[in-house]
Image (cartoon, helix red, strand yellow):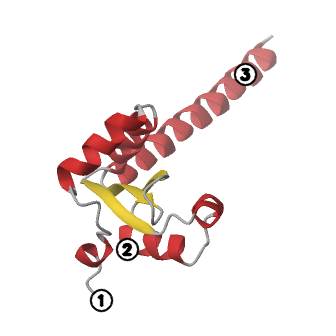
């Protein structure tokens, strides 16, 4: 019986170790990503009939990827113009905002864009410094 008890206790310790290790990794991941900045951005086509909403940690690089047609959606609908963006100190907040905006009605999105960019200009030159 003591041998069985010892085996059960050992397995219990191993399970507990991995449970705590997994929690530690999760906490490390959350604290690491919480400190990364993020952006929510909206792209549109030339005629401003399509809106693409995205999130990234590098706005300039991501817009350049869209313009190089590395995104299926943006290449299909020709969404090459950056018409709106928001900066967040924590990428988790950017993710939450992206989800929120994707659930908004189209009219609400256009109203938000026009608050920052009333002429619906391409804002890429304002964020690109190279």
Residue position for label 1 = 130
**Can you tell which of label 2 and label 3 is closer to the viewer?**
2
Mark closest to the chain's N terminus, 2 or 3: 3
In space, the residues marked 3 and 1 are separated at their CA atoms by 65 Å
Image check: 69 left or right of 40? right
Q: Residue at x 80, y 16 (%)?
A: 4
Q: Quadrant of residue 98?
A: top left
**Viewer can see residue 36:** no
Left/right placement of residue 29 relative to residue 127 reads right
Q: The N terminus is located in which quarter? A: top right
Q: Are marks 3 and 1 in contact (CB under 8 Å)?
A: no
Using the image as rendered, state which of residue 85 and residue 9 is in the foreground: 85
The residue beneath circle 3 is 6
Task: Residue 51 in the image: state x and y as whole percent.
Answer: 46, 51
Identify the mark nearer the N-term, 3 or 1: 3
Q: Residue at x 74, y 15 (%)?
A: 5
Tell me whether circle 2 and circle 1 mark residues in contact (CB < 8 Å): yes
Q: Nearer the viewer, residue 56 or 101?
A: 101
Judging from the image, what secondary structure is the residue with disc 3 in? helix
The mark closer to the camera, 3 or 1, is: 1
Crowdedness near tag 3: few (<14), some (14–19) or many (≥20) residues, C-alpha within 10 Å? few
Q: Which mark is residue 60?
A: 2
Q: Which image quadrant for residue 48?
A: bottom left
Residue 43 on image: x %, y % = 43, 59
């Amino acid at each position: 019986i003591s041998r069985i008890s010892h085996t059960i206790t050992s397995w219990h310790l191993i399970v507990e170790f991995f449970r705590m290790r997994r929690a530690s990794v999760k906490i490390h991941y959350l604290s690491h990503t919480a400190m990364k900045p993020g952006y929510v951005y909206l792209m549109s086509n030339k005629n401003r009939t399509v809106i693409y909403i995205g999130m990234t940690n590098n706005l300039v690089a991501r817009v350049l990827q869209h313009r190089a047609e590395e995104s299926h959606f943006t290449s299909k609908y020709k969404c090459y113009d950056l018409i709106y963006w928001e900066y967040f100190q924590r990428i988790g907040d950017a993710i939450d905002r992206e989800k929120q905006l994707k659930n908004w009605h189209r009219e609400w999105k256009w109203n938000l864009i026009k608050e920052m960019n009333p002429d619906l200009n391409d804002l890429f030159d304002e964020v690109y410094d190279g």
